[in-house]
């Protein structure tokens, strides 16, 4: 049953720092503009001084399931991310991602594919591309989790388009401005579940 929310999602989802909450609706006819910021370098940990071996970070494999179509998952096909029903082993591999710290904000997420590409938005469509090292790419591939009105689900906000969230529409995963509607809230709520592969 859809939530009766009238406010955009807020909260830090247990993260140590967050971006501002989504902005209210823009005036009709205005185009979105990307916010490009420099990628800060993390401070060196004093605990790692003098240590010759660092513990290896654990790898987190995730599949992303739709809240309102629970039998459908994000799936890379011909470079684009769609919302598809589970198929064979090749499908499962293309629907399993490594969840890593955000390229542009370590409090957020980036997703990598089995062949080393990153999921990023380009022309407001989610796709898998090789990291070209640019600041724009890093921001296009970084999404901050926000609380969803659905239990166990998150909404994923673009780091360089504040107030724009990933959602599925016609089974294509896109980046769209937040809307105050139950349809938008359900289309933009996803569960990060154990990897299918």
Image (cartoon, helix red, strand yellow):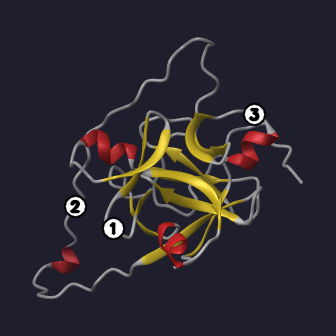
Q: Are dots 2 and 1 in contact, CB under 8 Å?
A: no
Characterize the local packing of mark 3: few (<14), some (14-19) or many (20 or more) Cα atoms within 10 angstroms. some
Residue placed under numbered mark 1 in the picture: 115
Q: In percent of the image, x 39 and y 79: which residue is there?
A: 59
Quarter of the image where one finds residue 119: bottom left
Which numbered tag is attached to residue 180?
3
- The reply, left or right, for residue 133 in relation to residue 71 is left
Q: Tell me how far mark 3 sits from mark 1, CA to CA.
A: 37 Å
Which numbered tag is attached to residue 43?
2
Q: Tell me how far mark 2 sits from mark 3, CA to CA.
A: 39 Å
Which numbered tag is attached to residue 91?
none
In the depicted structure, whether residue 187 falls above or below residue 16: above
Characterize the local packing of mark 1: few (<14), some (14-19) or many (20 or more) Cα atoms within 10 angstroms. few
Residue 194 image point, x, y percent: 57, 77
Q: In percent of the image, x 31 and y 65: which residue is there?
A: 116
Q: Tell me how far mark 2 sits from mark 1, CA to CA.
A: 30 Å
Which of the two discs, 3 and 1, labels the residue nearer the N terminus?
1
Q: In percent of the image, x 62 and y 72: which residue is there?
A: 87
In the depicted structure, whether residue 3 falls above or below residue 47: above
Q: Depth-wise, is mark 3 or mark 1 nearer the camera?
A: 1
- Secondary structure found at label 3: loop
Quarter of the image where one finds residue 169: top right
Quarter of the image where one finds residue 43: bottom left
- The reply, left or right, for residue 182 in relation to residue 127 is right
Front residue of 14/80: it is 80
Q: Depth-wise, is mark 2 or mark 3 nearer the camera?
A: 3
Q: In which quarter of the image is the N terminus?
A: bottom right
Residue 95 image point, x, y percent: 53, 67
């Amino acid at each position: 049953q859809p939530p009766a929310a009238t406010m955009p999602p807020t909260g830090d989802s247990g993260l140590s720092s967050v971006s501002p909450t989504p902005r209210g609706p823009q005036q009709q006819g205005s185009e979105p503009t990307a916010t490009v910021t420099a990628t800060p370098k993390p401070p060196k940990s004093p605990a790692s001084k003098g240590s010759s071996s660092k513990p290896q970070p654990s790898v987190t494999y995730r599949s992303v399931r739709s809240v309102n179509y629970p039998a459908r998952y994000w799936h890379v096909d011909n470079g684009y991310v769609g919302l598809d029903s589970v198929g064979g082993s090749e499908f499962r591999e293309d629907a399993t991602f490594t969840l890593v710290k955000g390229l542009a904000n370590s409090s957020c997420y980036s997703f990598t594919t089995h062949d080393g590409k990153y999921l990023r938005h380009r022309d407001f469509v989610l796709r898998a591309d090789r990291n070209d090292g640019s600041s724009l790419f890093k921001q296009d591939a970084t999404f901050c989790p926000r609380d969803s009105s659905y239990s166990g689900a998150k909404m994923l906000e673009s780091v360089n388009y504040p107030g724009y969230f990933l959602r599925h529409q016609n089974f294509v995963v896109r980046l769209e401005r937040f809307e105050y509607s139950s349809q938008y809230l359900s289309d933009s709520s996803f569960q990060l579940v154990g990897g299918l592969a």
